Image (cartoon, rainbow, N blue to C red):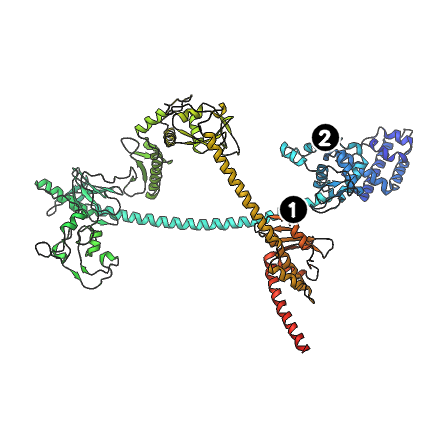
Amino acid sequence: MTITQERTDLSDVESDDATAWRGSAVSAPIVGHAHGTADGRKLIRHYAREVAALLAQQETAAPSMGTAPATSVAAEVLAACSGVEGGGADRWLDENNARTELPRIGWCVGLADVLAAAYAGDLHADTSGIVRRREGLGRRVRAVLVELLASGGYIAVPRPGRRGPVTVTPDGVTAHRWCSAAPDLLHTDERAAHQARVWLHHTSRTSKQTARDRARRLTPLPHGAEEKRRRAAQMRQVEQWAKEMQATRERLDSEQAERDAQAEQERAAEWARIQQQAEERQAAEDDRRDDGLVMSEHGPEEIIMGSGKRRVSVERINPSIWHATTHGAVYVVSQEGGEGWPWLVITPNNTRIDICSVINDAPYAASVRDIVRDHADAMERGETFPEWTPPEETGQSQSRLAAIGESNADGQTAHEPEPFGAGHEDADRTVTTAEPGACDGYGCTATGQRWKVAYLPTSLLCAVHAARWARVPVAGLPAAAGLPKVGKAYSSAAPARAVALDLNGSQWVAECDRHGPVPRGLNKFGDAVADVAAVYVYGNEQAAIDAVRLHLDAHARKDADVMTPEDIEAAQALNFSRDQCRTLGWIRDGKVGETAYGFTAYDIRPDRADVAKRIRNSLVPCLWAAGFVKALAVAPGAREFRLTDEGAHALRMWSNAMRISAVTEPEKDTRHPAVKNSPYPLLSAGKTWPGEQQKAQAAANAEQAAREQAAALRVAQEKVAADRAATPTADELAVMEALNTDGLDADAAAVLSAAYIGHVVTRHRPGATSVRLDENAGQDNRRVTRTYNINCVEKPITPAADEVLSVVSANLTDATAERWHALCTSVDERYGVYRLDLTAAINAGTTMCALLGGTIDLVSRSRDGGTS
């Protein structure tokens, strides 16, 4: 702002020479804004001193000018500034601030007019929230302008439901002075003012949409009370966020410390488990070493010591298959029946020869070597080695064996069968008393003969456990299911497995047999790869087993959609187009209907509601003619569609074929062979099936009758409820009678009044649980205005209940407020709102009636005694 721009305010204290001299003066900026008379006067004095200094400098620079002395001009300026009255300074300050702030904050003439009316006290708000120029029937003020002024903190509007004048805040008074001082700076229409506010908020850090949203509210007055209040609230919120952030950081640190400790414990446990596995693996490896081998410079060599032993190498292939190799011949040790079945030793020509012992759920290497050596030695000598035969079936065992102690047809007593793999000397032990710890420590307390089984690590089994575990046929007991015989189908090994890369078991890989003629390894994503370098190496066996399990799960998911070649050919014969498949899916979900306007699919979008799509008139009839769809008449002129069994089967088969990419969708619809003899009658052509209209009309009539019956029942129930509401209950009459008792104190009257309100409200609205009491005509007069149910649904009180309650006073005064507080769920003393619990009020009224009844009896008895 230049000196010449201030000539309007100081021209009355300047001479013509000073004015002419100041025309070419240098502009002097004024920094900052002032709000208030004191700040304005201080700013004017500072400005006058700067003017005097500039005049003195000008006089020194040009002494030959024929102007008044600078000292006299400065004196005049200072005298004029010191003599300015408070009103003139305020007007100058308001005009200065208005010219600086009004164009930026975006005010229009309408806002200034509404603010001026509020400043004059002409705006009043009624209970419905409508603001008028005068109280009563004055002209309404636009709600948008009132909301804008209230959003910026310039006016204060009464709360909803209350009436009163619209007052002006201190910021509103200042803004009114600015508008009065510079009315030419106000925008003529609201659109221009809104655009100015948009440009105010549209910065490099905010988007245009955010600026539009903020422009719907007025900004507070710069450096005003509302802005200070908002900044204080923001600072309080920031402080609260800082406290919460510190608490969250501490909680996260403690959780991280717990996780670190737990991870350390898990690592220690994992390391202990790895060490234990290494020790067990080393022990097993030591056990597999052949006693007949010595180490030489050329590696292990077989020697003959005494009778000599054949070299047998035992190797674990997977959890259910082991290999025993001797001189190139591979014997398979397999647990064919799965977990819990014995381990069979099978020769290279697929002959089962014997069952080996088990240790730690794995074949015992020494037992396997002995069986393999015996078989190999017998083959070298040309002898016949006996094959292993499974136990006989249950029916054969029970038919061949008789019960112990019973006689057969020849009169001879049957003997206990000899256990499999047991000697006669081991089967004659008899237990006469219970022996805890028998049967391998399983706590068996059975008495009787004990059996010894050679291929189990335990011995001396009772009859029950021998039949169950060792598969020994015992008379009178069901024999266990035998192993499958040669040639029968049996459970095969899993196609994927974990394989160790070294003898120490420090590196493991996962491989699968279902991806080619040879097993393929899995990469780190669980996919089979042909490149050996891409196979992922795991650090322990459990990680490789987990990868195998995930890979097998993927195979299982794919196997769920496996189709036979016949199914694929049937799906290819269907050859549904995309529109046909989609229409069948909509019909399966019950979303397709037909009217006189054609076929329509309703609610077809899962992300949007009420989205419909028209279907071609030739699409559904072709599917109906092929037998995939059936039509249902639901109302006159309306049909719905459902899938037939053939249609559901065809859609399911086509979906599976599409899922495995066995078929492709054609571009055009496929015409399937028709199974219907008659053409489809289109409702859009005005055609129907014989009797369709009658059936649909009958269904519509039945539905209308059901609706009328429900309406009649509802009317009857409403009538019964009205009769019940019109008849006071016995408890209500008792409370009313107690209220009319003479000499009733204030507390008792308050309790009885609350109970009376509860009885009346529950009689007219049975589902009510609480009511709201507001101020009425006076401060100590309350009336029920709202009722609430158990779900806090608010409803206005019924007119009948309001009429009944208006006769009796609520007796809610300052003296009885404490008594009312005990019966209310919430109390707002500021606005005089009470929330009365009806159940508590009714129970308190019942108790008070009982107390008053006893007191009245005692008083009547005392009066009778005094009279007599």
Q: Residues within 10 Å of mark 1 (few under 14, many from 20)?
A: few
Q: Secondary structure at mark 2?
A: helix
Which residue is tagged 2?
192
Judged left or right of residue 132, residue 459 is left
Q: Which mark is residue 235?
A: 1
Residue 21: x %, y % from top left: 87, 29
Front of the two marks 2 and 1: 2
Do we see residue 618 in this rendering?
Answer: yes
Q: Amino acid at mark 1?
A: Met
Query: Is 186 or 158 nearer to us in this picture?
Result: 158
Q: Residues within 10 Å of mark 2 (few under 14, many from 20)?
A: some
Judged left or right of residue 76, residue 220 is left
> Which quadrant holds residue 309?
top left
> Which quadrant holds residue 406?
bottom left
Judged left or right of residue 494, residue 710 is right
Query: Is 207 or 603 nearer to us in this picture?
Result: 603
